């Protein structure tokens, strides 16, 4: 789906140990590890982007260290998300349910400057599929230039209008229309209408 804007590496984070790690620290660490793996980054590569040590990042991912605010911001920026991506919503499910279910009020959200908002419907990023609810503000687009990446994607338009370009072919989709294509083919998309467009989007492998 929409490609997160990268925050340049080179920011120095002050490390602050905050006592005994708690369940939230473990949840944060697991979320960092999942997203890093989905983006195919090694711990060393993440360390280079954040100016944090490999050892410290390893402790964070295992829930053994409570990261400082500055460390959270550096990690989020390096992975192309906001800090809120890593924190459990108040209504998030507990226990085994969290491995299988995402409650409507507990979705993780990514908002882009372009006017596109992605809501993660998948319980985790460790599987082969990623399920998103994408909202396009009127006029919002993935960008002027098409992009390509490995994998496949498909979706269905729930409401509004979606203009989809796959290489040189243009398709105008309305509510109820669906699509599927190899992500290796250059593509782009936008909402050409005056109302919000909502799309269920499936991507494999996960991009977030």
Image (cartoon, rainbow, N blue to C red):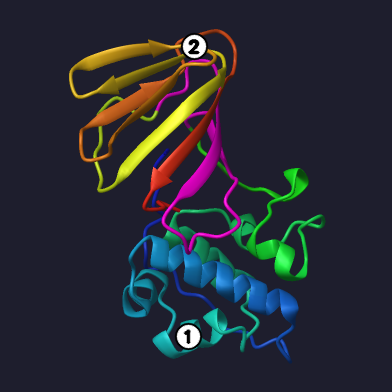
Q: Residue at x 25, y 48 (%)?
A: 150
Q: Is residue 51 above or below residue 16?
A: above
Of tags 1 and 2, which is closer to the observer? 2
Q: Is residue 14 left or right of residue 45?
A: right
Q: Are marks 1 and 2 in contact (CB under 8 Å)?
A: no
Q: Which residue is mark 2?
A: 174
Image quadrant assignment for residue 190: top left
Instruction: Magenta stretch: give its range.
Output: 114-141
Q: Is residue 64 magenta?
A: no
Secondary element at tag 2: loop
Q: Residue furthest top?
A: 194
Return the x and y of residue 40 as percentages of the image width and height.
33, 65
Q: Quadrant of the N terminus?
A: top left
Residue at image mark 1:
58
The structure residue drawn at horizontal position 67% and vertical position 48%, both measured from the top left corner, is 107
Marks 1/2: CA–CA distance: 46 Å
């Amino acid at each position: 789906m929409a490609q997160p804007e990268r925050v340049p590496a080179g920011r120095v984070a002050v490390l602050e140990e905050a006592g005994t790690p708690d369940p939230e620290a473990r949840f944060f660490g697991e979320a960092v590890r999942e997203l890093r793996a989905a983006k195919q980054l090694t711990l060393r590569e993440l360390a280079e982007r954040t100016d944090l040590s490999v050892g410290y990042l390893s402790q964070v991912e295992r829930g053994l260290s409570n990261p400082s605010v500055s460390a959270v911001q550096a990690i989020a920026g390096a992975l192309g998300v906001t800090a809120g991506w890593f924190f459990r919503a108040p209504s998030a499910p507990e226990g085994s349910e969290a491995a299988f279910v995402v409650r409507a009020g507990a979705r993780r959200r990514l908002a882009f400057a372009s006017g596109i908002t992605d809501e993660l419907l998948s319980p985790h990023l460790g599987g082969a599929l990623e399920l998103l609810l994408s909202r396009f503000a009127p006029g919002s687009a993935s960008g002027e230039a098409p992009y390509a990446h490995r994998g496949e994607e498909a979706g269905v338009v729930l409401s509004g209008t979606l203009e989809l370009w796959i290489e040189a072919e243009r398709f105008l989709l309305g509510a109820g229309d669906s699509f599927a294509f190899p992500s290796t083919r250059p593509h782009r998309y936008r909402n050409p209408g005056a109302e919000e467009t909502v799309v269920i989007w499936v991507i494999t492998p996960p991009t977030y």
